[in-house]
Amino acid sequence: MNDDLIASAEIGEEARRFVESELGMCIIGMAEQDKQLALEQLGTINPTDEDGIRELQNKVKLGTMFEQWLVELIDKGNAAMQVFKQQNEE
């Protein structure tokens, strides 16, 4: 159990450092730009182009999910660290 908590805490910390790094900010920015472009294109795509619509929807979803995955890893790591600290205080 402690090994799982430590692993989650370490991954959360790595995710936090990545998000705060220049590389992380750049990649998150690129994902956001792709998402925004896809949203704009959805407004002008031919409504009968089902494949194109599906592709744009997937780009929007991926752009949204990428940042959410990182936030979830950070939150899970923070929670694991709190549990670990509580267990060691008892």
Image (cartoon, grey):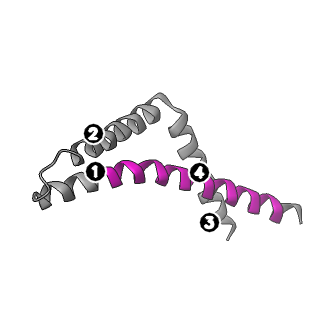
Which x, y percent locates residue 27? 39, 36
Which x, y percent locates residue 50? 13, 61
- Which residue lies under the disc numbered 1? 59
Query: How far, Cα to Cα, is label 4 from label 1?
Result: 23 Å
Query: How far, Cα to Cα, is label 1 from label 3?
Result: 33 Å
- Which residue lies under the disc numbered 2? 37
In this view of the protein, which residue sits in the foreground, 41 or 30?
41
Q: Is residue 64 left or right of residue 44?
A: right
Q: Which mark is residue 74?
A: 4
Query: How far, Cα to Cα, is label 3 from label 2?
Result: 39 Å
Which x, y percent locates residue 32? 38, 40
Q: Identify the mark nearer the N-term, 1 or 3.
A: 3
**Image quadrant assignment for residue 33:** top left
Give the amino acid at mark 4: Ile
Magenta extent = 59-87
Give the amino acid at mark 3: Asp
- Which residue lies under the disc numbered 3? 4
In this view of the protein, which residue sits in the foreground, 13 or 60?
60
Q: Identify the mark nearer the N-term, 4 or 3.
A: 3
Q: Main secondary structure of the magenta part?
A: helix
Cβ atoms under marks 1 and 2 closer than 8 Å: yes
Label 3: few (<14), some (14–19) or many (≥20) C-alpha neighbours in 10 Å: few
In this view of the protein, which residue sits in the foreground, 58 or 76?
58
